[in-house]
Image (cartoon, rainbow, N blue to C red):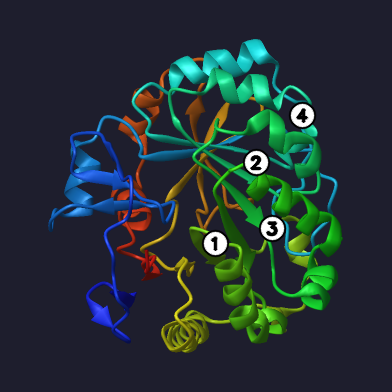
Amino acid sequence: MTTLSPGTSVLPVPEVPARDQRRVADGAVAFTTGHHFALDGQADPGALGEAAAAPLSVILQVTKRCDFNCGFCSETLQMADPTLGQLDTVRASLAGVQRVFLSGGEPLLRRDLPEIVDMYSGFIIGLPTNATRGLVMAPRLAGKVAFVNIGFDGPRSTFSRVRGDYDKAMTGVRAFIETGLPISLSAVVLRSTVHALPYLCQIADVLDAGKLKLILPLRKGNALGLPEREFISVDEAHDAFGRLTELRATHDWRPAVRMTPWTPETEGHMIVIEPNGNAQAWPVYDQPDLFLKLGNLLDEPVTAIWDRYPYKANHYAKYLGRSIYTATRSGP
């Protein structure tokens, strides 16, 4: 079912049960081949969040370094990379979490990333990347991560304007695919890139991506320099998603599509762990840097941080697709 908001149908898109779903927690939640969590039954995400001892998913920044300088990037503050010893301490502190994004910056800049991936093998691992080092790293990561989430904003001219070297990134994408690593695509939606979304969805379909993830920019870091006209409203995002899912149905594009608007229901839903171990709720709209510090994973377990985390309902609702715009993966 394609939805713009909880329970609201746009167009009937055939839904096929995801293959090889991975059951997590108490069995109520599954991790699907659309590279997102899905909920069995009609349980309330807020109640699930209150009953949970730990988050479903966290973002762990293994570096702040990056070889791109995207105009919409919010994470530009530099920090020293965590050591393997510090990352192992954080790993132990994350017991109870289902999925860990080994993120950045650009995580593939760490030559020891395969060792970090091995260290976190007990989790569902997502790997956000710009793919520029995919040719080198893909063979070393084959079979070790659930999926690679590649920042990809559209066809060549759009990609080159807002992100960087399209051909270098696409070479990395092909390397991931050739080594059997499942991929998803992720894009920040600007007013000047909305027109490219159908082309991006087709690219995702051709690449057999599990998911196309779309988010709106946040006013932080490089994005503070974006012209105000580049920020679309929630209503405009709603309309753009509706048009995209109509085309998706018309052309039978298969990847799941998810778009996150910045609303009260999505505030603070992410837990970001910085290289220094600080765990932050993100984005928290009344904070100057959009971060609300929760604690430090080098000093205490995630269960203690989860106890004081004020956005449990938002966390579960977002990751279970209840507070965002969603279209599930279709086809065989």
Q: Amino acid at mark 2?
A: Thr
Out of 178 and 69, give the one closest to the viewer: 178
Q: Which mark is residue 220?
A: 3
Question: According to the image, label 4 marks what residue?
Answer: 110
Q: Quadrant of the C terminus?
A: bottom left
Please tell me which residue is depicted at 61% across the width and 79% down the height of the picture: 197
Q: Which mark is residue 179?
A: 2
Q: Which mark is residue 151?
A: none
Residue 130 can be seen in this image:
no
Task: Determine the CA span between mark 1 and mark 3.
Answer: 32 Å
Out of 226 and 8, give the one closest to the viewer: 8
Q: Are marks 1 and 3 in contact (CB under 8 Å)?
A: no
Q: Secondary structure at mark 1?
A: loop
Task: Determine the CA span between mark 2 and mark 1.
Answer: 14 Å
Q: Secondary structure at mark 3?
A: loop
Q: Are marks 1 and 4 in contact (CB under 8 Å)?
A: no
Q: Is residue 56 left or right of residue 62?
A: left
Q: Which mark is residue 208?
A: 1
Out of 83 and 141, give the one closest to the viewer: 141
Q: Amino acid at mark 4?
A: Arg
Q: Give the x, y percent position of residue 2.
A: 33, 76
Q: Quadrant of the N terminus?
A: bottom left
Task: Determine the CA span between mark 1 and mark 4.
Answer: 27 Å
Q: Secondary structure at mark 2?
A: loop
- Foreground mark, 2 or 3, reads 2
Q: Give the x, y percent position of residue 115.
A: 65, 19
Q: Secondary structure at mark 4?
A: loop
Q: Earlier in the sequence, mark 2 or mark 3?
A: 2
Q: Earlier in the sequence, mark 1 or mark 4?
A: 4
Task: Determine the CA span between mark 2 and mark 4.
Answer: 20 Å
